[in-house]
Amino acid sequence: MWMSDLPPFIPFFIAALLALVTRGWVRGAVIVVTPILGGLHLWMDVAPGVVATWQILDYELTLMRTDRLSLLFGYLFHIAAFLAGVFALHERDTTQSVTSLLYAGSALGAVFAGDLITLFIFWELLAITSVFLIWARRTEKAMQAGFRYLIFQVASGVLLLAGALVQYQHTGSLAFDFIGLDGIGGWLIFLAFGIKCAFPFLHNWLTDAYPEATPTGTVFLSAFTTKVAVYALARGFPGTDILVYIGAVMTCFPI
């Protein structure tokens, strides 16, 4: 049963389990149909203002928080997952089929996260699932590039968690809203987002790892990793002046 407060990552995680136990055209159908159904559910059943939480001990994770920004990226990510899935229909590698669905689901989990701890969880899931799309080429260069990629992505996650804890200490809140650069916590989170967004001088992981991924892996990687970071910057640092200069440099010296 489709519910308005069903977090969008859940259908993709369920689909990953189905992809693990199916083969051939059935698996292909799972990969392609999941973003179609998920996108239709998001478009028809989910409105701004929906909040879904999950209580763990004394902390409440906000697994889903919808507004116009998160819904926009949610629509785009479902479209991207569908197009990447169509491209991957030729794929017979179970690892790539499963991890690509987990990866897309993790991207959606990050987009709809309402607090920094939930964001951190999906931030790290993005790193763990995506590296298998690099290793799936099964060459020595791909293995080495994957490990370097993972180091950068995990470092980004550590900075995010550290920034979130500092932010909580100073503000008493872990809400994933405007953060700004007024304190150390904000700068740590900004740097975490910058690594995943491939800011200048922080982008070597992208040019190193993406060419070593499989064709299917490259398509999925191009669709989600940096785009999640763009969303995070738009959510946490809107109107931040330094982003203008960083964007100008990235435009003049594209990766």
Image: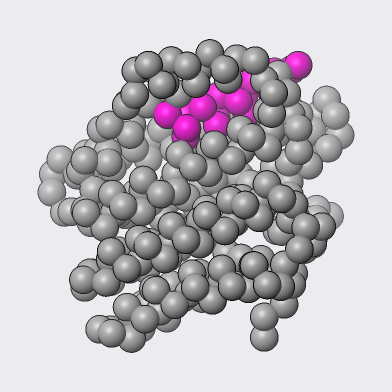
Count how many numbered circles sit on residues in the image.
0
Which quadrant of the rendered structure holds the N terminus?
A: bottom right
Q: Is residue 130 left or right of residue 114?
A: left
Q: Residue 10: percent from the left, percent from the top? A: 58, 70
Look at 60% across and 14% down and name the residue there.
242
Q: Is residue 79 left or right of residue 189?
A: left
Task: Using the image as rendered, state which of residue 172 and residue 239 is in the foreground.
Answer: 239
Q: Residue 240: percent from the left, percent from the top? A: 67, 20
Q: Which residues are magenta?
A: 182-198
The answer to whether residue 239 shows anywhere in this view is yes
Residue 233 shown in magenta:
no
Extreme residue in the right direction: 172
Look at 61% across and 33% down and name the residue there.
233
Which quadrant of the rendered structure holds the C terminus?
A: top left
Q: Residue 20: percent from the left, percent from the top? A: 36, 77
Look at 39% across and 73% down and name the residue there.
31
Residue 197 shown in magenta:
yes
- Up the image or down, 165 lies above or below 187; here it is below
Give the dominant element type of the magenta stretch: helix, strand or loop.
Answer: helix
Look at 39% across and 74% down and name the residue there.
32
- Up the image or down, 189 lies above or below 116; here it is above
- Up the image or down, 47 lies above or below 203; here it is below
